């Protein structure tokens, strides 16, 4: 069952001079317990879309359902009750600078009929969960970016939400810290069963933690599906562009352009790009082909990653040997996308 | 010492009681008018912030009325305001002159200014933090008290200092129309009777008061900035 359902959501911003259609007719269903990614370049409308989920932004048209409750027709106070079940974290962390770490985390709990002792207990549990017990009395200005985001996560978890919305939560962090925050998100997805919606412009984030992805461009969702299929068989140019941002395979084209000695072919050699598209294909195929056809693969680039437990990616290599054409045919039969980029016999 | 002062500031030393009374009157006017203006200005500043477009209690009508009213009162020079609000003053405090008569015009003169100061102080509270508070399901009242007023303390303290200093100036001006206080003291003796030393002493006392207010304000800002 879909936990979050967006039905034909549109959001148009009207300013004095122009109107911006930030989100156009987007329908999405996000299931309970999954990590759902929304990727797009800057200005694609990702933030606007995710802010429509908890109605920080009122859609101009369309409906939002959460647990089958139609949020778009709730009163202000009922909406606030539902919002407590939807945590949110931001790129800029948005902690209160006047409050200590523990007071930031207790903010959503205050005034909810809980006793001081209950709140304190909950706060220290949360601090422990995000690994910041020693920073309870610190002020946000005394923390690193990664620590601030952990506090923000703890605060978002205070009301035991069912969903966590993350708007570019790792975009202000270095790669190492990004990794640890992503691991934390996966942990709370697995251990607490929280549905996570991740907004990002980084393909690496999607690859690392998401099970399904929606690709946004100019306010529209142009491609959607489980991460592996979208990656393996992108339908849209923008999706390919995103895939290329995390793959080094396309660097070969730059080398060719620069006439690099690395890609100078001797007679009988071919420059080939192999891409694994099917989940069952794995690397041993190359060595199998090497033996079977007596060919040699000199691998220049390799970019094979495990996504959702399946290898995805490919290699660029110089192929030599008499039976290289047969070898390529064989690989194609096995479901590998093989492309000869440059052929010594032709060029 | 006594001798020395009597030579240096003879006209002040001849009426120490009057000077003391003038100081006390000034402090009373600044204190009471300041306290009332602080509360009213804060309330109006908050209302205009939250009813603004995109605010947590967006309300076009309230915003527009308040916005226009503040602009009108800010446009009126204080010296004109003094006579303009005289009837209101009589109605509220029963008198148009003296220390109590000056209260009403002082409040009218300060509140619009302070409300604008509060508005810009609260505008410095990051919109992201307000959004985070909304996202966690906080009510508008909780957002006002727990987020705006807490996060805004340093800037509110700065605005309060500025306004208090402004108010001291207005109080002296109110002295011109017989409100009492240091302004009145300086005009009556320093200006009208050419007792220059009275003017000097008044100026020094006012500078001391302003400096103390500024120091307290700076301390409050510093203590609340983390
Ligand atoms: N409050 C607003 N008023 C007017 N236009 C807006 C507003 N918020 C967003 N927009 C516009 O809507 C479009 C989508 O913005 P949005 O912030 O959703 O993009 P995004 O995909 O999150 O981009 P980024 O990766 O830069 O955060 C942009 O053209 C932006 O200028
Ligand atoms: Mg954004």
Image (cartoon, coloured by chain):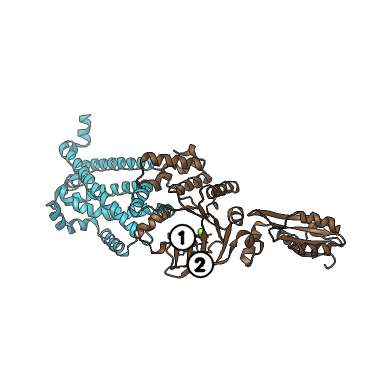
- Residue B202 vs residue A338: left or right? left
Q: Chain of mark 2?
A: A
Q: In the figure, the cyan chain has which letter?
A: B
Residue ID for mark 1: A53
Q: Which mark is residue A67?
A: none
Q: Where B166 falls versus B72 (above or below)? A: above
Neighbor class of circle 2 (other Cα within 10 Å; few <14, some 14-19, many 20+) is some
Q: Secondary structure at mark 1?
A: helix
Which residue is at 46% across, 40% downward? A125
Residue ID for mark 2: A26
First in sequence, mark 1 or 2: give its number.
2
Where's residue A236, x and y in %?
62, 67
Q: Secondary structure at mark 2?
A: strand
Q: Where B145 falls versus A15 (above or below)? A: above
- Residue B146 vs residue A148: left or right? left
- Mark 1–mark 2 Cα distance, whole angstroms, equals 12 Å
Q: Is residue B56 visible?
A: no
Q: In the figure, the brown chain has which letter?
A: A
Q: Nearer the viewer, residue A177 or A82?
A: A82
Where's residue A10, x and y in %?
47, 68
- Residue A306 vs residue A212: left or right? right
Q: Is residue B150 visible?
A: yes
Q: Nearer the viewer, residue B55 or A56?
A: A56
Q: Where A119 falls versus A257 (above or below)? A: above
Quadrant (top left/top right/bottom left/bottom right) for the C terminus of chain B: top left
Where's residue B7, x and y in %?
21, 34
């Amino acid at each position: 069952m879909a936990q979050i359902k967006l039905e034909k959501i549109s959001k148009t911003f009207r300013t004095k001079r122009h109107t911006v259609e930030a989100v156009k007719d987007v329908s999405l269903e996000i299931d309970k317990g999954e990590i759902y990614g929304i990727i797009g370049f800057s200005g694609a409308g990702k933030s606007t879309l995710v802010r429509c989920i908890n109605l920080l932004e009122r859609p101009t048209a369309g409906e939002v359902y959460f647990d089958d409750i139609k949020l778009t027709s709730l009163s202000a106070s009922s909406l606030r009750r539902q919002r407590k079940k939807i945590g949110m974290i931001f790129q800029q962390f948005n902690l209160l600078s006047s409050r200590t770490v523990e007071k930031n985390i207790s903010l959503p709990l205050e005034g909810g009929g809980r006793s001081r002792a209950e709140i304190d207990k909950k706060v220290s549990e949360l601090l422990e969960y995000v690994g910041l017990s020693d920073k309870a009395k610190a002020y946000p200005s005394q923390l690193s970016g990664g620590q601030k985001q952990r506090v923000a996560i703890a605060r978002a978890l205070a009301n035991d939400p069912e969903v966590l919305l993350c708007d570019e939560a790792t975009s202000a962090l270095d790669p190492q810290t990004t990794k640890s925050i992503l691991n934390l998100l996966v942990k709370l997805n697995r251990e607490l069963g929280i549905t996570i919606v991740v907004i990002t412009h980084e393909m690496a984030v999607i690859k690392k933690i998401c099970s399904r992805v929606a690709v946004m461009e100019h306010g529209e969702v142009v491609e959607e599906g489980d991460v592996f299929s979208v990656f393996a068989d992108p339908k849209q140019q923008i999706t390919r562009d995103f895939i290329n941002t995390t793959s080094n395979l396309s660097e070969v084209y730059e080398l060719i352009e620069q006439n690099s000695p690395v890609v100078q072919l001797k007679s009988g050699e071919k420059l080939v790009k192999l891409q694994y598209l099917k989940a069952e294909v794995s690397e041993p195929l190359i060595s199998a082909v090497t033996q079977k056809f007596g060919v040699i693969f000199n691998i220049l680039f390799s970019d094979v990653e495990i996504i959702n437990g399946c290898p995805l990616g490919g290699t660029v290599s110089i192929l030599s040997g008499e039976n290289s054409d047969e070898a390529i045919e064989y690989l194609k039969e096995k479901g590998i996308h093989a492309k000869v980029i440059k052929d010594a016999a032709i060029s | 010492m006594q001798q020395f002062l009597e030579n240096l500031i003879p006209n002040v030393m001849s009426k120490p009681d009057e000077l003391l009374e003038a100081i006390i009157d000034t402090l009373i006017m600044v204190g009471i008018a300041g306290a009332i203006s602080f509360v009213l200005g804060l309330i109006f500043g908050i209302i205009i912030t939250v009813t603004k477009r995109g605010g947590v209690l967006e309300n076009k009508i309230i915003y527009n009325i308040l916005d226009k009213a503040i602009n009108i009162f800010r446009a009126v020079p204080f010296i004109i305001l003094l006579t303009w609000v005289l009837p209101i003053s009589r109605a509220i405090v029963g008198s148009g002159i003296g220390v109590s008569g000056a209260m009403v015009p002082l409040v009218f003169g300060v509140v619009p200014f302070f409300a604008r100061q509060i508005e810009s102080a609260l505008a410095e509270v990051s919109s992201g933090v307000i959004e985070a508070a909304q996202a966690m399901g906080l009510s508008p009242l909780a957002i006002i008290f727990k987020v705006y007023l807490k996060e805004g303390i340093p800037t509110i303290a700065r605005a309060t200092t500025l306004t208090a200093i402004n108010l001291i100036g207005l109080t002296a001006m109110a002295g011109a129309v017989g409100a009492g206080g240091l302004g009145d003291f300086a005009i009556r003796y320093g200006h009208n009777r050419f007792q220059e030393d009275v003017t000097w002493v008044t100026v020094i006392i006012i500078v001391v008061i302003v400096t103390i207010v500024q120091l307290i304000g700076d301390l409050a800002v510093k203590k609340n900035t983390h």
